[in-house]
Image (cartoon, rainbow, N blue to C red):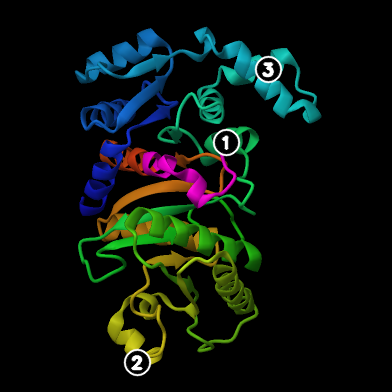
Amino acid sequence: MRFVGSIIEKLQRHPKRIVFPEGTEPRVLQAARQFHSLRLGAPILLGDRSRVKQAAERLNVSLEGIRIINPAESDDMETFVERFQDLRRARGVTADEARDTMVKPNYYGAMMVAMHRADGLVSGTNEYTGSVLRPLFQILKVAPSANVATSCMIMEVEDSRFGADGVLFMADCGVIPEPSAEQLAEIALATARLARHLLGVRPRVAMLSFSTKGSAHHPSLERIRQATALAQEKAVIQGLAADVDGELQLDAALVADVAARKLPESKVAGQANVLVFPDLNAGNIGSKLLRHVARANAYGQVLLGLNRPAADVSRGSSAHDILGVAAIVGIQAIDYPLLYPGSG
């Protein structure tokens, strides 16, 4: 709660409009209610108005201050249809096909963000990842200054000795199954920028592996070593004040005593606050293990590298998790061009 509390305080000074495509989902309704009650901005629910109201009544959730939009009846529909047809013209999308697509909440929500009708999007409580990401990639696309779209989980653990006062940024846990060395480097820097933006701390990025600095030998390790070198080089070029080290085992990255024995000279070992996993299998497993076994507060997936801020939350997310993610998306929206110059 320490982390989310600080995010909420910042967003209260700069409220934002967040669209939630899953307007009848109970957890989303509760999160939207809290979002408004905490004065974080204007929550926007998508869906049939009568069904949203019925769902809210069953939960005894007030809809005061919450906007409800039925895409099929929206005044913006024709504008959105024309825009989507322009975006997909190379694919031969017709006006009728564009209209059929734009009534889908995730597509409509993505277009709201693209057309500045909303400042960010949060979806995924009842959707597979592809159903959330596909509209975002087709409509928002990758930011001009980013080479890849990725994601990260933000985990808050009880023990403040880990990460930045108990907060760890873990990537990629949701988008790229087998990242190349170049993609791993981009994942590392994008996550480091988010850590610095949200917490104001110096990112200490650990490129994780089953080996620490050559303690094991396997062809797969070369990709992690290349990614580490690339990330270090790009951080200097981009003027990002961050420390990057790898390859590191998880204990060497997080546990001070282990780091003192293995890598006493490292600026990252034993004090990493950004953990970059070698592939999606490791990232997804690691984040869920920490969430359920260590009972960490989990916020994400926060999407990185898109032209506008968005998040794909886990289907296992609670209303509190969704609120936290919405607040993070709102904070990103305050000065998103600082994260991704030329975006928006």
Q: Mark 3 and mark 2: span between their CA atoms?
A: 61 Å
Looking at the rendered structure, the kind of residue marked 1 is Leu
Vertical side of 278 occupied by 1: above or below: above
Q: Position of residue 128 (x, y in %)?
A: 51, 37
* 3 or 1: mark nearer the eye: 3
* Residue corresponding to mark 2: 261
Residue drawn at point x = 25 percent, y = 16 percent: 64
Q: Is residue 329 left or right of residue 182?
A: left
Q: Mark 3 and mark 1: span between their CA atoms?
A: 17 Å
Residue 120 lies within the magenta run? no
- Along the viewing direction, whichever of 283 and 201 lies nearer the viewer: 201
Work out whether mark 2 precedes mark 1 in sequence or the reverse, and give the earlier one: 1
- Along the viewing direction, whichever of 130 and 336 lies nearer the viewer: 336
Q: Position of residue 334 (x, y in %)?
A: 40, 41
Residue drawn at point x = 25 percent, y = 56 percent: 295
Residue drawn at point x = 36 percent, y = 53 percent: 198
Magenta residues, start to end: 329-344
For label 1, the SS is helix
Label at residue 82:
3
* Residue corresponding to mark 1: 136
